[in-house]
């Protein structure tokens, strides 16, 4: 079953509760946290996540685009995340492992994220201890960018590694996922699709979520 994770980066932040209820037929709520250092944009953080947690029981998929995420992962768990993902490029391997361990110690799911330039092999030392791997199909930082189809061989390579070493691990893609690009992601082996503008700009959001399932 393909899961859809709408990114609230494309929601109206002045009407966030309404815009979360609008995606109730989706599987996860994808929350993009940006610090203006790891990526050239600033989005939302802990207080907003706490407020979201109060108005929905949906699974909260928190994508941290921040430097040294090990400093903050426990607080994002306490604020209501169900899954916290950290970029492998955002700290040393030791600290990425420590971040994963802290998320697990809070009883939450942990994942790693790869920027477009980061090769598939970067997952190897984390693969057997994470619940999700996220492959970026745009440069992180902004919604509404063009889908990078050249990431598909990486998705396929990681799907093969997951099937061999940790079949329960989910494989997510993020960036430029839309009705014309969702099938290529699914065919490459992704089972969770993040979509921001394709969901929130759609005239009929439930129909668009169904369409993205392929
Ligand atoms: C980009 C974010 C994405 C973004 C996706 O850094 O991680 O989650 O919101 O937006 P679209 O689907 O519009 O490319
Ligand atoms: Zn994201």
Image (cartoon, helix red, strand yellow):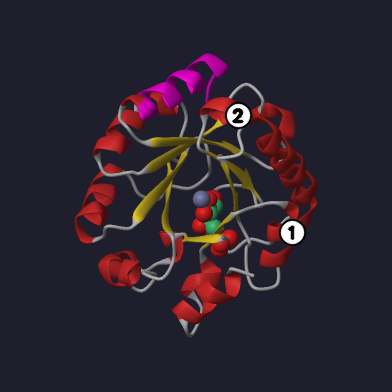
Residue under pointer 2? 127
**Residue drawn at the location 80% of the way across and 51% of the way down:** 150
Q: Taking 52 as reference, is 157 left or right?
A: right
Tell me where residue 116 appears, x and y as whole percent: 69, 42
Q: Please say if 174 is above or below 40.
A: below
Tell me where residue 182 appears, x and y as whole percent: 66, 65
The boundaries of the magenta stretch are: 91-104
Q: Residue 21, labelled with which disc?
A: none
**Residue drawn at the location 39% of the way across and 70% of the way down:** 23
Mark 2 residue element: helix
Separation of disc 1 and disc 2 at Cα?
Answer: 21 Å
Q: Nearer the viewer, residue 158 or 122?
A: 158
- The answer to whether residue 84 shows anywhere in this view is yes
Whether the magenta-drawn stretch holds residue 67 is answered as: no
Does the numbered disc 1 mark a residue whose Cβ is under 8 Å from ligand 1?
no
Give neighbour class at mark 2: few <14, some 14-19, many 20+ (Cα, 10 Å).
many
Of all residues shown, which one is farthest toward the left? 54
Residue under pointer 1? 187
What main secondary structure does the magenta stretch of the protein show? Answer: helix
Q: Nearer the viewer, residue 59 or 54?
A: 59
- The answer to whether residue 119 shows anywhere in this view is no
Earlier residue among tags 1 and 2: 2
> Which image quarter has ligand 1?
bottom right
Which quadrant would the N terminus be assigned to in this image?
A: bottom right
């Amino acid at each position: 079953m393909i899961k859809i994770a709408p990114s609230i980066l494309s929601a109206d932040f002045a009407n966030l509760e309404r815009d979360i209820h609008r995606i109730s037929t989706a599987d996860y709520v994808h929350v993009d946290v940006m610090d203006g250092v790891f990526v050239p944009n600033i989005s939302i953080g802990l207080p907003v996540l706490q407020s979201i947690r109060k108005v929905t029981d949906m699974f909260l998929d928190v994508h941290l685009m921040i430097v040294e995420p090990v400093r903050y992962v426990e607080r994002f768990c306490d604020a209501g995340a169900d899954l916290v993902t950290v970029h492998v490029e955002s700290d040393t391997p030791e600290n990425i492992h420590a971040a994963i361990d802290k998320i697990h110690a809070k009883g939450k799911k942990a994942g790693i994220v790869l920027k477009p330039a980061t090769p598939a092999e970067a997952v190897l030392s984390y693969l057997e201890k994470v619940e999700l791997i996220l492959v970026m199909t745009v440069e992180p930082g902004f919604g509404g960018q063009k889908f990078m189809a050249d990431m598909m061989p990486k998705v396929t390579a990681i799907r093969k590694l997951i099937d061999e070493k940790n079949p329960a691990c989910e494989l997510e893609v993020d960036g430029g996922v839309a009705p014309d690009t969702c099938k290529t992601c699914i065919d490459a082996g992704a089972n969770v699709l993040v979509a921001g503008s394709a969901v929130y700009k759609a005239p009929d959001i439930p129909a668009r979520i169904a369409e993205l399932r392929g």
